[in-house]
Amino acid sequence: MHVHHHTRAGPDRSRKSGSSWSRRRIAHRARRWAMSTFITRLDSGGMGPRVAVKDIIDVTGVPTTAGSRAVAELARPAVRDAECLAGSRASGARIVGKANMNELAMLPVGTNPWFGTPSNPLDPDLIPGGSSSGSAVAVANEDADVALGSDTGGSVRVPAACCGAYGLKTTHGRVGLKGVWPLAPSMDTIGPIAMSIAGLTTGMELLEPGFVVAPSPANVIGRVRTAGLPAIETAVDESLRAAEVEILDVEVPGWSLGTFAFTVLYFAELWEADHELVNRHRGKVGADVAKTVAMAARFRPQINEALRQRDQWRTRLSRVFERVQLLALPTLPIFPPRVDELPRDLTSTVVEITKHTSVFNAGGTPCLAQPVSAAGTPVPASLQLVGPWHSEELLLATAEVIAAAAP
């Protein structure tokens, strides 16, 4: 296995030279080569699917950077794979690289001050979404058949939505996290991103050998109305109508419980995971990351109340799933913003982007994001299907029916 490390973004700044770079240029001459998609490129043998791995997941012999200069300068080559890669290795999958990401997996916009920002294949002016930005861009650019990302508050679903891809956040605890850089362990999950439901299914088969999609889709889907843009709400409705599934409008009580629980747990746990690193290496972590860690102080004292509200939220969710098999709502309430229009203080942007995703990290439930066409815009909207715990099989079967019915 050959390793190519990239330290900065840019089309012509490979640290490799000569024939290796020439060969890769030829291989990618049909499209623009975006080096910032990957932090490390790997030339891996094997006949299986090409897999991009987010750079918080250990790959034997490769340093894990977590998208951070501070981590990269300390990192040693991993001595073993993360446990979630066992199925990929057993199936002969080809790991093509460690994908770029928001630093320390902390934010959902997809920018990175150290390794560059992966270019959104739909429109390079738009954010790619994060934190698994490189994972979504890798599949959208056909650099990988499947990508593995992490999702703690939306980090698989948000970049999938921004890049017109499919993303699956798995049930918390279903996929092992040993060998994965932690952010908020009570909500961290690993899941696949791909350009089709078949690709997501392959991703689940790699993560969980023996995985099989449910034989039939959901009969009744609960439609959750949101304050998302009307064009996005309409796109979700039309995709469900075309699939001819039974829709029931539902209220999800206790949404604010999930939001509160997520917010407190996220800040309290990321502080535990990263504050020492950030405090020790001030000049080598991004300002957005340092600011996020600094915000944790106001939330940490509320941890017991957050755990209580999380339990209440899960109880409310389980009652909703007694009435309907799945929930449907927009993944994002907005279309991806422009990179050059991101405010210096990202707080309000982060809240807006994750308001439909993070509550389900507090719930621990699986969710699937899939592109649906929206009128009058070249960028698709994204439908989010949410299921009860361990219903990934049903989510994929239902999403397949919706995708097949799309005009």
Image (cartoon, rainbow, N blue to C red):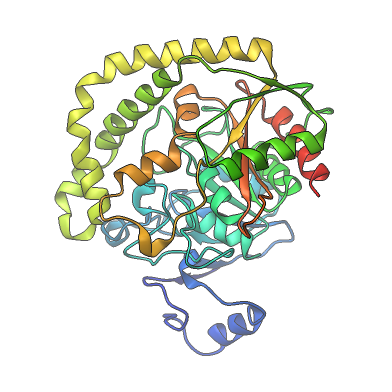
Q: Is residue 362 above or below residue 237?
A: above
Whole-percent x and y of residue 364? 51, 25
Q: Is residue 65 above or below residue 251?
A: below
Question: Which of these two is toward me, 311 or 44?
Answer: 311
Quarter of the image with the N terminus is: bottom right
Q: Name the quadrant containing residue 347.
A: top left
Task: Give the left or right position of residue 332, taking residue 265 as reference.
Answer: right
Q: Is residue 216 above or below residue 70?
A: above
Q: Which residue is at the far bottom?
A: 18
Report if residue 48 is visible in the image: yes
Whole-percent x and y of residue 227? 50, 33
Question: Which of these two is toward me, 386 or 169?
Answer: 386
Task: Give the left or right position of residue 286, taking residue 335 as reference.
Answer: left
Q: Name the quadrant containing residue 365.
A: top right
Whole-percent x and y of residue 127? 46, 58
- Please give the count of numbered marks on the rendered protein: 0
Whole-percent x and y of residue 78? 42, 53
Q: Name the quadrant containing residue 187.
A: top left
Residue found at x 67% / y 79%? 30
Task: Give the left or right position of residue 71, taking residue 313 as reference.
Answer: left
Report if residue 210 is visible in the image: no
